[in-house]
Amino acid sequence: MVLDPGAAAAASGQGGAVLGELPERDGSRPCSSCPSPPPRQAAGCSARYPRGSRRLSESGAGTRRGGGACTGSGGRMRSAASLPHIGRPRGEEGGGGGGGGRRSPCLLVALRPLNVEAERERFFRARFAYDPQFEYAEPVPEAVLDKYRAASDRFVAQAIRIIHAVLEKYGTYESFEVATGGRLLSKCQIWSVIRKYMQKEGCVGEVVVQLTDDLLSQAVMMVEDSRPTLAINLAGARQYWLEGMLRHEIGTHYIRGVNNTRQPWHSSEGRKQYSLKPANPTEEGLASLHSVLFRKQPFLWRAALLYYTIERASRLSFSALFQDLEQYVQDASVRWEYCVRAKRGQTDTSQPGCFSKDQVYLDGILRILRHRQTIDFPLLAALGKVSYEDVNRLKKFGVLEKARIPHFMQDLERYMKQLDHIVTTNQLNEQELEELLPD
């Protein structure tokens, strides 16, 4: 592993690491060479998300809070300046053409309440009979709230069926988490898994990685100072789930992003020129499928529960939503995180309302599974940030030479069998999907 704590910290504001090569570790025990430095606050948005950072993805549901960041030490030094440069297309959120003007705060920070911990304590002291009153560092842009104000109920029946399938097999969410997720990993075990995965994808030394305890999600892929940066929530890094998260963030978002930079539609102007559909829900649906790919029991629990929670949040107060989720999740801390995620952006959570962005995961999953027999998946990866609906039309215009394909797509026959296994495990009905999503 090649680490440049100083350069990476300067790039990320929070002791990140650039992953490279290091002598093999078995990852079975803590290592003294992985200290946890105290967090250092950076100017701007936050220590973990400085002003001007651009979020590429956000995966998974909220998780409980864990430890601190781990930068590691030892090995040969590599300058963070050698990381790939990913330019920011004009017109993107938090962007700007380098004119030195004030940049808007990154969305994830803008949506995280300043007083979330204080309101959590008050909510629990009130025995859950209180609706949090959230405060934000800056007003959340109305355009963002308007975009995600309305929830869909289109796939609620499928979401509930997936949730019930899990509970029928495991009894409770908590049992499901232990049985399928395994134990929480130490920081050095996490670094070991990450390094091995980067080697599989051939992207050693290309991504700054941060371990953090301050996310509402399991992981976030961002661009900070034009460098790809992956922040991982320590509390969600489980033995059998971590590689799936890396397939989601690196194997899908990062690789498609790298391929996208070489395409004629890499800019907003190019997307308009080629009349591209939005990358979502394809982008997050594909990544979410890759999260559970190759699991023996590839349940889509997280995507399903997020979809259901948001639909209910649009009609319920925070406290009523929290009570409703008890039928599926007994752990009050986990329920709190789901509710915060569904209600983020709201100030007075006694009112019905939601932030519906997280419905995109199940929406995208079902659309891809519905059309999986006709999608060219390696081409979908090679063409970059495009919808599966645009693939056949764009292939004659795409730059395919030296395109990166995720390692887990190399055996396409096995890949397709795994998608079939996901359909069966989650009790999805082919005819029902065809009726819900007609051509």
Image (tube, grey):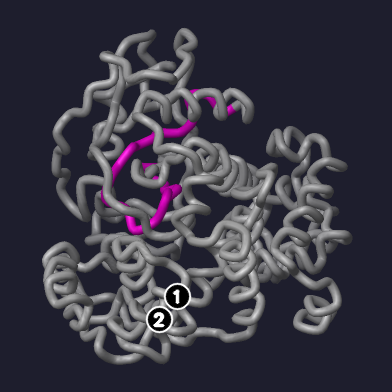
Identified at 51% across, 69% down, the residue is: 305
Q: Position of residue 183 (x, y in %)?
A: 43, 37
Res. 112 in view: yes
Identified at 70% across, 69% down, the residue is: 366
| Residue 141 image-quadrant placement | bottom left
Which residue type does callout 1 highlight? Gln
Q: Position of residue 121 (x, y in %)?
A: 13, 66
Q: Considering only vertical position in the picture, is 106 above or below 278?
A: above
Q: Where does the magenta region start and end?
A: 203-226
Name the secondary structure under disc 1.
helix
Q: Mark 2 touching mark 1, by CB under 8 A?
A: yes
Task: Mark 2 vs mark 1: give the one in front.
Answer: 1
| Residue 149 image-quadrant placement | bottom left
Q: Count residues near mark 2 (Cα–Cα under 10 Å), then give few for <14, some for 14-19, many for 20+.
A: some
As drawn, is 310 to the left or to the right of 30? right
Residue 324: which disc?
A: 2
Which residue type does callout 2 highlight? Asp
- Does the magenta portion include 220? yes
Name the secondary structure under disc 2.
helix
Res. 278 in view: no
Q: Position of residue 53 (x, y in %)?
A: 34, 51
Identified at 27% across, 50% down, the residue is: 65
Q: Quickly name the residue at label 1.
A: 327
- Does the magenta portion include 37? no
Q: Considering only vertical position in the picture, is 70 above or below 150?
A: above
